[in-house]
């Protein structure tokens, strides 16, 4: 969840949340690349150090050193947040959560066979239904869309 006042306690909570999500998704973490923002306090780093995760801070004012997260933030802004007026913190958290689920579960990525980051596309030996019949799955009132063939 977002906050208006990120403090030491909140940052440590975010680190523990990241560790839980990675463990649940069975994603191993060997190192953490982060910028040199003052919000990354020692309590934040300790969560990762206890799990034997190496912390790699980027150089000051060098966003290209962490291009993957910069691209994700850009996608979140341009594909989602720029289309909404958030009416409070809970509304923002809901929108970001929906986008995160869409991004990780449905949105195609430049990975082998264009598979999603989490989970797998169903493998089917026979064609799925009529190739002309396409179904649109929508999230956030149609801002996020995923198209697939209808099941037979």
Image (cartoon, grey):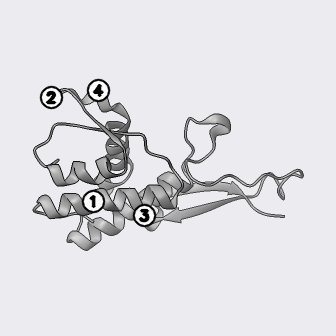
Judging by the rendered image, the residue that carries numbered circle 1 is 14
Element under label 3? helix
Q: Quadrant of residue 90?
A: bottom left
Mark 3 vs mark 2: in front: 2
Q: Earlier along the polypeptide chain: callout 4 or callout 3?
A: 4
Q: CA distance from mark 1 to mark 4?
A: 23 Å
Q: Quadrant of residue 2?
A: bottom left
User: What's the CA distance linking mark 2 and mark 4?
Assistant: 11 Å
> Could you tell whether 113 is left or right of 101 in the image?
right
| Front: mark 2 or 4 | 2
For residue 143, say whether it is visible.
Answer: no
Q: CA distance from mark 3 to mark 1?
A: 18 Å
Q: Residues within 10 Å of mark 1 (few under 14, many from 20)?
A: some
Q: Which residue is mark 3?
A: 98
Q: CA distance from mark 3 to mark 2?
A: 32 Å
Task: Indicate the position of residue 89 as horizontal and vertical percent values.
Answer: 21, 69
Q: Position of residue 6 (x, y in %)?
A: 13, 59
Of mark 1 and mark 4, the one earlier in the sequence is 1
The correct choice, above or below, for 125 with respect to 94 in the image is above
Numbered circle sitting on residue 60: 2
| Whether residue 121 is situated above or below residue 72 in the rendered picture | below
The answer to whether the residue labelled 4 contacts the one labelled 3, judged by CB atoms less than 8 Å apart, is: no
Quadrant location of the C terminus in the rendered image: bottom right
Give the image location of residue 115, x and y in percent: 63, 44
Task: For label 3, count other residues whose C-alpha is less than 10 Å away and answer few (under 14), some (14-19) or many (20+).
Answer: some
Q: How far apart, in angstroms, are the residues tagged by discs 4 and 3?
A: 27 Å
Return the disc, 3 or 1, that comes first in the chain's sequence: 1
**Residue at the spot of label 4:** 64
Q: Secondary structure at mark 4?
A: helix
Quarter that holds the N terminus: bottom left
């Amino acid at each position: 969840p977002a906050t208006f006042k990120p403090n030491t306690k909140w940052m440590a909570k975010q680190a523990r949340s990241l560790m839980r999500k990675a463990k649940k998704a069975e994603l191993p973490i060997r190192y953490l690349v982060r910028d040199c923002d003052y919000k990354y306090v020692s309590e934040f780093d300790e969560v990762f150090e206890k799990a034997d995760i190496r912390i790699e801070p980027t150089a000051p004012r060098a966003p290209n050193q962490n291009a993957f997260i910069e691209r994700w933030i850009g996608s979140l802004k341009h594909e989602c947040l720029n289309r909404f007026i958030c009416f409070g913190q809970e509304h923002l958290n809901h929108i970001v959560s929906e986008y995160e689920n869409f991004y990780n579960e449905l949105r195609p990525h430049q990975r082998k066979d264009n598979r999603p980051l989490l989970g797998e596309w169903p493998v089917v030996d026979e064609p799925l239904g009529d190739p002309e019949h396409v179904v649109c799955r929508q999230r956030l009132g149609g801002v996020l869309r995923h198209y697939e063939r209808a099941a037979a």
